Amino acid sequence: VDLRYNNFELVLEPSTKAVMVCIMDVSASMGINEKTIAKKFFTLLYMFLYQKYETIELVFIRHHSQAKEVGEDEFFNGKETGGTVVAEALHLASTIIKERYLGSNWNIYITQCSDGDAWGQPDCDKTYSIIQKELIKNIRYFAYIETSRYAHISQLYNAYKELEKEYANFSVQRVFQESQIWEVFKKLFEKNKKSV
């Protein structure tokens, strides 16, 4: 057997495409200030990824008691509101990623903005499970910002802090006002710069 033709060496080709899944809480508890912070954060992340990749696709998911994929205009300007169920949004994100992006050499980023209000501990537990079992192993990075007006720590934030301890590609920060966005953005992505 001629070893010249039977020895293969794997050569990794860097991917030049990324998908950014944007998840925004649009429940009644999210005020104008919280939504403005979320919008500015999504824009900043898009600009960051635009510098790194030749091709970027955007997926927009709005959620209150239900989650749905929408276009950019509805994502930022839609008026629909209601209660808050977080797990629905993460389940939808997982479905979209599996159907469109897995196995196609995409760098997958998820960014989520919420005020941390969730449908109690069962919703937080289900959300945690979806991230841990379905999402985290398939994505490049997950960034969560909580746009809270209050000092108290939400159940969702506590659940996400546990994920942050466990996974290098998961990061959590809180934002109270617009002036903090840039500093929070830097903190989110300094945790594991190699994975980003």
Image (cartoon, rainbow, N blue to C red):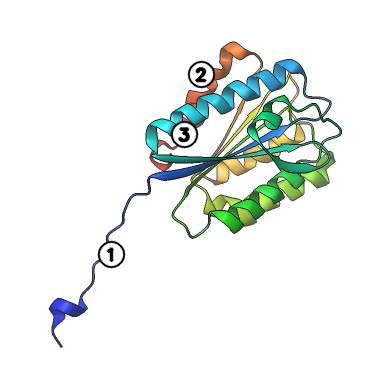
Disc marking residue 10:
1
Kindly state the secondary structure of the residue where label 2 is placed. helix
Cα separation between marks 2 and 1 = 40 Å
Q: Position of residue 101 (x, y in %)?
A: 53, 54
* Mark 2 closeness class: few <14, some 14–19, many ≥20 residues within 10 Å: few
The quadrant in which the C terminus is found is top left
Residue drawn where x is 42% and y is 42% of the image: 195
Question: Label 3 is placed on what type of residue?
Answer: Lys
* Mark 3 closeness class: few <14, some 14–19, many ≥20 residues within 10 Å: some
Left or right: 170 in relation to 150: left
For discs 3 and 2, the disc positioned in front in the rendered view:
2
Residue drawn where x is 82% and y is 47% of the image: 122
Question: Label 2 is placed on what type of residue?
Answer: Glu
Q: Which residue is mark 2?
A: 183
Please say if the residues under marks 3 and 1 sit with CB atoms less than 8 Å apart: no
Kindly state the secondary structure of the residue where label 1 is placed. loop
* Earlier-in-chain disc, 3 versus 1: 1
* Earlier-in-chain disc, 2 versus 1: 1
The quadrant in which the N terminus is found is bottom left
Disc marking residue 131:
none
